[in-house]
């Protein structure tokens, strides 16, 4: 199973790997045509109801593969309003090849005739809300027909994730449900969508050539859906508290600056008063809360818990040091805290011994992972299995840094994450990332990663925040390496994060 949101990401990742979207559309259209041929003999009348997006583009392609049938392509809208280049190209191909086409701009003009098969390619998985005209009338005509109905990816008007009709403001059908197409067959692509099993329809999953790496590895598609609401207000895009500093001043600043550059609205730093002036001096954009003394320890617990309660996410550990007082503070803080936290650096070694209600994202390098009690391996796939098992044991998300980063979702429990479930379940619980370069072995890049993940964890779930954070921080490092080679330093990365966050 794959959700529609994840499918959009995988599709974009496949394109980034070099699989052209037009090639995927060609494979999808061919799969639709195969399904039509399975229910209709040569010469049968086939009406293709096509929207103006890529769902309609799949049907444009299918029409070319149905040359032995009596095909009519009905475009719901004007050709110039077709929304994607590849769909427009396939529409132009139909016209040049003199495949019968009709343009429907008024639902009153829609005449399907008496087809043997109707292909529903009006709206795909990415559309929300109830059907509008002319799709609403087309759905009603389809449901009233005696033709076999083949839907492309999902029946129009149905939520592919739930199987429920979408919306109710467009009126109801004769069953009292929101208007939607009642398909006999559904051809969906790459993997089944969660809601399709609830339909009274035969579902075919077509392999259209998306490589496994498009799911396994992070890519630009993972950034989709992270754009902020244009009507949002200050604080609604994340408030992050960085807890650290004392022995070091640069680490908490790097984490905090990176959180801001990744998109957090407000970033605060809780650090000892001995370094507070220096941390504040790095940037006027930060809000610094000083703590008495030169090290963070148990005496600061109540104050820091109060600060943490006012933020969406805590980044715990940058520059904290490895003294006994720091370890005791981390232990007591995590035992009392029930929010979301990114745990990094010296704070990591405490995690396995603490019983906490917090949602943790731990960001160790491989040496720190072993220090926590985990295992590693040189082969990325073997390491992924070991990390997934340890994440499940901890019950938290792990982002293990390396030449290939491994991100594992420990919240799913031993069975799913550690290999006791299906291959698909294991793949969903583990992601790999290969952005980044050897120049990022320089000190401070881990602090950049922690802050990046912290900002993302304020607006999405921990596993996705860790996966996207690894991709974005690595991409920022690659941009820095393009300019500085292996002479890059950690301070080169934060200001490149906004460019790395673009999903183009």
Image (cartoon, helix red, strand yellow):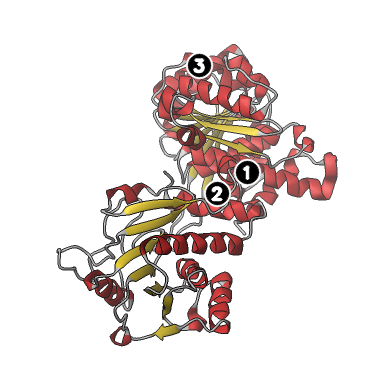
Residue at 40% x, 64% y is 36
Outermost residue, front direction? Answer: 42
Which residue occupies the foreground of this view, 140 or 216?
140
| Left/right of residue 245 with respect to residue 417 in the rendered view | right
Location of the N terminus by quadrant is top left
Q: Is residue 292 visible?
A: no
Q: Are marks 1 and 2 in contact (CB under 8 Å)?
A: yes
Return the residue at label 3: 352
Circle 2: element type:
helix
Q: Position of residue 77 (x, y in %)?
A: 42, 81
- Position of 321 relative to 176 (above/below): above
Residue at 62% x, 25% y is 383
- Position of 244 relative to 126 (above/below): above
Q: Which circle, 3 or 2, is nearer the viewer?
A: 2
Q: Quadrant of residue 24?
A: bottom right
Q: Are marks 1 and 3 in contact (CB under 8 Å)?
A: no
Circle 3: element type:
helix
Neighbor class of circle 3 (other Cα within 10 Å; few <14, some 14-19, many 20+) is: some
Q: Quadrant of residue 151?
A: bottom left
- Upstream in sequence: badge 3 or badge 2: 2
Neighbor class of circle 1 (other Cα within 10 Å; few <14, some 14-19, many 20+) is: many
- Upstream in sequence: badge 1 or badge 3: 3
Task: Determine the CA span between mark 1 and mark 2.
Answer: 9 Å
Q: Is residue 132 visible?
A: yes
Return the residue at label 1: 471
Mark seen at residue 222: 2
Location of the C terminus by quadrant is bottom right
| Left/right of residue 290 with respect to residue 192 in the rendered view | right
């Amino acid at each position: 199973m794959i959700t529609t949101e994840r499918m959009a990401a995988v599709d974009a990742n496949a394109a980034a790997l070099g699989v052209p979207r037009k090639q995927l559309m060609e494979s999808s259209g061919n799969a639709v045509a195969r399904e039509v041929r399975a229910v209709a003999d040569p010469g049968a009348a086939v009406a293709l109801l096509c929207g103006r997006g890529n769902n309609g583009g799949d049907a444009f392609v299918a029409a070319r593969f149905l040359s032995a049938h009596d095909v009519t392509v009905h475009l719901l809208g004007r050709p110039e309003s077709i929304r994607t280049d590849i769909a427009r190209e396939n529409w132009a191909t139909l016209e040049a090849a003199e495949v019968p086409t009709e343009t429907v701009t008024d639902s009153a003009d829609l005449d399907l005739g008496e087809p043997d098969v109707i292909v529903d390619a009006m709206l795909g998985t990415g559309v929300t809300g109830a059907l509008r005209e002319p799709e609403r009338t087309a759905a009603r005509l389809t449901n009233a027909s005696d033709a076999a109905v083949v839907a492309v990816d999902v029946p129009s008007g149905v939520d592919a994730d739930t199987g429920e009709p979408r919306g109710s403001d467009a009126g109801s059908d004769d069953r009292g449900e929101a208007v939607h197409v009642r398909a006999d067959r559904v051809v969906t692509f790459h993997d089944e969508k969660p809601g399709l099993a609830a339909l009274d329809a035969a579902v075919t999953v077509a392999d259209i050539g998306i490589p496994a790496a498009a799911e396994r590895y992070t890519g630009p598609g993972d950034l989709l859906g992270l754009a902020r609401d244009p009507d949002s207000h200050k604080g609604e895009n994340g408030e992050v508290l960085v807890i650290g500093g004392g022995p070091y001043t640069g680490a908490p600043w790097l984490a905090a600056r990176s959180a801001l550059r990744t998109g957090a609205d407000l970033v605060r730093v809780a650090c000892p008063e001995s370094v507070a002036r220096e941390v504040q001096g790095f940037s006027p954009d930060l809000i610094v809360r000083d703590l008495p003394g030169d090290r963070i320890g148990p005496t600061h617990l109540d104050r820091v818990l109060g600060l943490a309660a006012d933020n969406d996410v805590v980044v715990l550990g940058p520059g904290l040091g490895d003294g006994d007082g720091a370890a005791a503070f981390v232990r007591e803080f995590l035992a009392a805290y029930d929010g979301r936290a990114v745990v990094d650096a010296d704070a990591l070694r405490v995690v396995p011994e603490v019983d906490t209600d917090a949602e943790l994202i731990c960001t160790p390098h491989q040496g720190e992972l072993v220090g926590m009690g985990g295992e590693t391996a040189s082969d990325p796939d073997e390491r992924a299995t070991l990390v997934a098992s340890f994440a499940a044991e901890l019950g938290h998300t792990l982002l293990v840094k390396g030449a290939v980063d491994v991100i594992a979702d420990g919240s799913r429990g031993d069975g799913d994450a550690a290999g006791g479930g299906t291959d698909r379940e294991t793949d969903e619980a583990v992601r790999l990332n290969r952005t980044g370069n050897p120049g990022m072995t320089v000190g401070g890049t881990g602090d950049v990663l922690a802050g990046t993940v912290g900002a993302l964890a304020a607006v999405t779930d921990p596993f996705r925040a860790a996966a996207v954070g690894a991709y974005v921080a690595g991409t920022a490092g690659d941009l820095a390496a393009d300019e500085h080679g292996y002479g890059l330093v950690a301070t080169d990365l934060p200001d490149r994060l906004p460019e790395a966050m673009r999903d183009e």
